[in-house]
Amino acid sequence: MAERQLVVYRDGDTIAQAGAQRTLLAILDTLSAQPQAERFDLALTGGSDSLKALSYMASNPLTQVIDWSRVHIWWGDERFVAADDEDRNALQARRRFLDALVSDGRLPAANIHEMPADTRSPKQAAADAAASDAGDDTANDALLDAAAQQYEQELVAELGEQPVFDLLILGMGPDGHYASLFPGHTEVNITDRLVVGVNHSPKMPPLRLSLTAPLLARSRRTWFFTAGAAKADAIAQVFAKPDNPSYPSSFAAGTEEFIWFTTADAVAKVL
């Protein structure tokens, strides 16, 4: 595994700008240096810093010189809601950046690999939620597991039995969670799946899908975009002890590069 690096910027906006530039350069350099390579696989998650970076990518001149037909987009986690729900990470990414690439004919729509959305009627979703609130998670758990298996199958079909991303971009919550792997939940300890359903998420919405910790740790490059004093306690704990279920982000890694892009107030208890 790569040694963890720490890059401290002035503020979150600088992280987003630098992150956008670095991401585009990583794609461009990899595809240019390895013309025999068929593709570049980029995995995204939600979060304000990551979404802001996508907005900066949209206006960056480097976007115009990348062969997007060789780029595939994946998600590290997703809110299990309807495809047009504002909570969808993929919807936000499409609006900020990806849809423009598709409409311009640069990025094939098939290269965007969204996690499954919730296709239930509002009435059925409400009924299943009511059952869950009453202690019966059978319907929601089955639905999440089926969706997780569907995304697993897509990963394996595209990237093989042991999928590896070229670049994984993550954020971290003040509680130390990453993707949708939360402290106090068992999903961070699952090692025999690529994708898991997450029920009763402590952050709304309560139903989610997430890549598992072993898959997330296999990325060639892993970058965290994490800013703000609210993250300071969690970052200190993450840096103090690896693979700590109380702070799931401590499970993250990268095989060739592992960088935390952050701000001084976020790492005040580390430096």
Image (cartoon, rainbow, N blue to C red):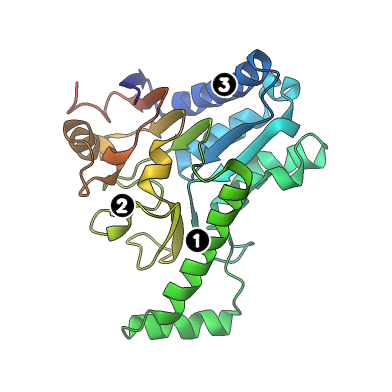
Q: Among all residues in the image, which is located at the extreme front?
A: 161
Label located before the other in sequence (2 or 1): 1
Q: Which residue is mark 1?
A: 148
Question: Which residue of the protein is positioned furthest toward the top in this rendering?
Answer: 33
Which secondary structure, mark 1?
A: helix
Q: Residue at x 59, y 77 (%)?
A: 120
- The CA span between labels 3 and 2 is 28 Å
Q: Is residue 73 above or below residue 253?
A: below
Closer mark to the observer between disc 3 and disc 1: 1
Observer able to see residue 105: yes
Image quadrant containing the N terminus: top left
Q: Earlier along the polypeptide chain: callout 3 or callout 2?
A: 3
- Residue 73: % across, % down: 61, 41
Nearest to the observer: residue 106 or residue 50: 106
Residue 80 in view: no
Q: Which residue is mark 3?
A: 26
Horizontal relation, residue 62 to residue 200: left or right: right
Where residue 231 sits, quadrant-wise, is top left
